[in-house]
Amino acid sequence: MSPKPALVRIRGVSRRFRDTVALDGVDLDIAAGEFFALLGPSGCGKTTLLRVLAGLEHPDSGTVTLDGRDLLSVPAHRRPVNLMFQSYALFPHMSVERNIAYGLARERLPRAEIRERVAAVLATVGLGTEARRMPHQLSGGQRQRVALARAIVKRPRLLLLDEPLSALDKNVRAEMQLELKRLQHEAGITFLVVTHDQEEAMSLADRIAVLDRGRVLQVDTPVGLYRRPRGRFVAGFVGSNNLFRGRLRASGGLEVPGVGVLPAPVGAEAGATAGAAIVAVRPEGVRLAAADAHGTVGAEAVLSGTVLDVSFHGGSSRIAVTVAGLETPVLVTTSGPATVTAGARVTLSWDADSAVLIETEETTRKVGGETPCDP
Ligand SMILES: Nc1ncnc2c1ncn2[C@@H]1O[C@H](COP(=O)(O)OP(=O)(O)OP(=O)(O)O)[C@@H](O)[C@H]1O
């Protein structure tokens, strides 16, 4: 599953709260030194899994080992695991250094060692000159660093971070993402971060597990998840995607009723019986051109439509195009400002290489008739 030997091995972990299945047979391997993210919508079970690892929750079934030893029978306070909560409350009446030293003092470590470790970790998080400040004298980003320092100073084998950056505004957040990666690397601690923000997971993690309704749908690198999403849910949750439903033709292409034949990945031709399938195309894989004066479409055009909306995002623009016969607009990303405005007639095209086969009738059957939400 992972290239390195697993530090944490989770097998068949389930947890139910009355009618709610929070975790449903979760299997995961997390390698030593890895920055691993759990990504999924609200309520998919991310926090419950962290709480199981931290010892704050006991699963109904399943096993968890750390370094090959059973973790579930170890009481929370004896686990080499630290959990940094969503709201990283600091002690308001204690200085930065006392906040950080608190956990070590409770372990009754010698004073000199505490001083040394606190000073080292303050330098690591870049707060050397703020050691004597009180929490209310710090910015949100600095408070976040103190919370991280407090978690790292105890040198856990595994640091669990529950939505660690959610309290920060956008700019500080981007800065702290870089900081978190650097810290993880420097401290050499395995990080398991929980987030519902796919961009954050993609920019932080070495590998990501996508969860939905208590189940792990896919584990992969950020690029792997983006390029080879398995199933509709991951395709729609990790980045934007245009999903086209139709039937694969024996001669190639996806026949979408009322729309026509769209490029499908090479090798995805239907076998003896043409199969229902979903093909995904990323917005950046779609080319857009203005239709000519007569509104006729060019030879390479796959679809023609009308621009519904244009939004500018600095380095790129997002254009939504309504196409007759399709329920949802096709999204197109272009670099820089868009050259078209709402109401313009445009043509869309893409290569078979940009199309990914997400699901066939066969795979739909394999998941036992499960019907993940349409993105
Ligand atoms: N102590 C509890 N009692 C009852 N239901 C619970 C309890 N803890 C969690 N749940 C339910 O279990 C499911 C999973 O919750 P969990 O907090 O793990 O989700 P999450 O993915 O972390 O969500 P969020 O991103 O909103 O924090 C939810 O439906 C939640 O309501």
Image: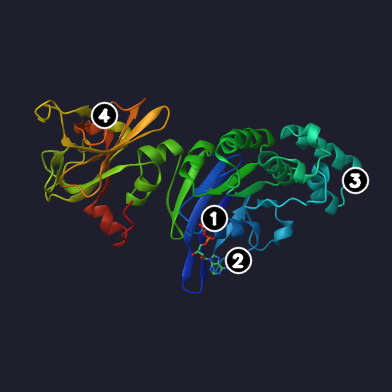
**Dot 4 corresponds to which residue?**
340
**Tag 2's secondary structure?**
loop
| Mark toward the start of the polypeptide (3 vs 4) | 3
Cβ at disc 2 under 8 Å from ligand 1: no
The residue where tag 3 is placed is 110
Instruction: Give how far apart the Cα atoms at labels 4 and 2 are.
Output: 56 Å
For label 2, count other residues whose C-alpha is less than 10 Å away and answer few (under 14), some (14-19) or many (20+): some
Residue type at mark 2 is His
- Check if mark 4's residue and mark 1's residue have beta carbons within 8 Å: no
**Observer able to see residue 188:** yes
Q: Give the spatial CA distance, label 3 vs label 2.
A: 34 Å
Outermost residue, right side: 111
Q: Amino acid at mark 3?
A: Pro
The residue under label 2 is 58
Residue type at the position of mark 4: Val
Q: Which residue is mark 1?
A: 10
- Image quadrant where residue 178 sits: top right
**Residue 2 visible in the snapshot:** no
Which residue occupies the extreme bottom position in the image? 18
Q: Earlier in the sequence, mark 1 or mark 2?
A: 1
Measured in 3D between alpha carbons, the distance from the residue under mark 1 to the one under mark 2, in whole angstroms, is 13 Å
Q: Give coordinates of residue 96: x percent, y percent.
A: 79, 43
Does label 4 point to a residue whose CB lies under 8 Å from ligand 1? no
Quarter-wise, where is residue 255 in the image? top left
Q: Nearer the viewer, mark 1 or mark 2?
A: 2
Q: Secondary structure at mark 3?
A: loop
In the rendered structure, are the residues bearing label 3 and label 2 in contact, judged by CB atoms less than 8 Å apart? Answer: no
Q: Amino acid at mark 1?
A: Ile
Callout 4–callout 2 Cβ contact below 8 Å: no
Q: Note whether ligand 1 is within 8 Å of mark 3.
A: no
Colour style of the rendered protein structure: rainbow
Q: Is residue 371 above or below residue 82?
A: below
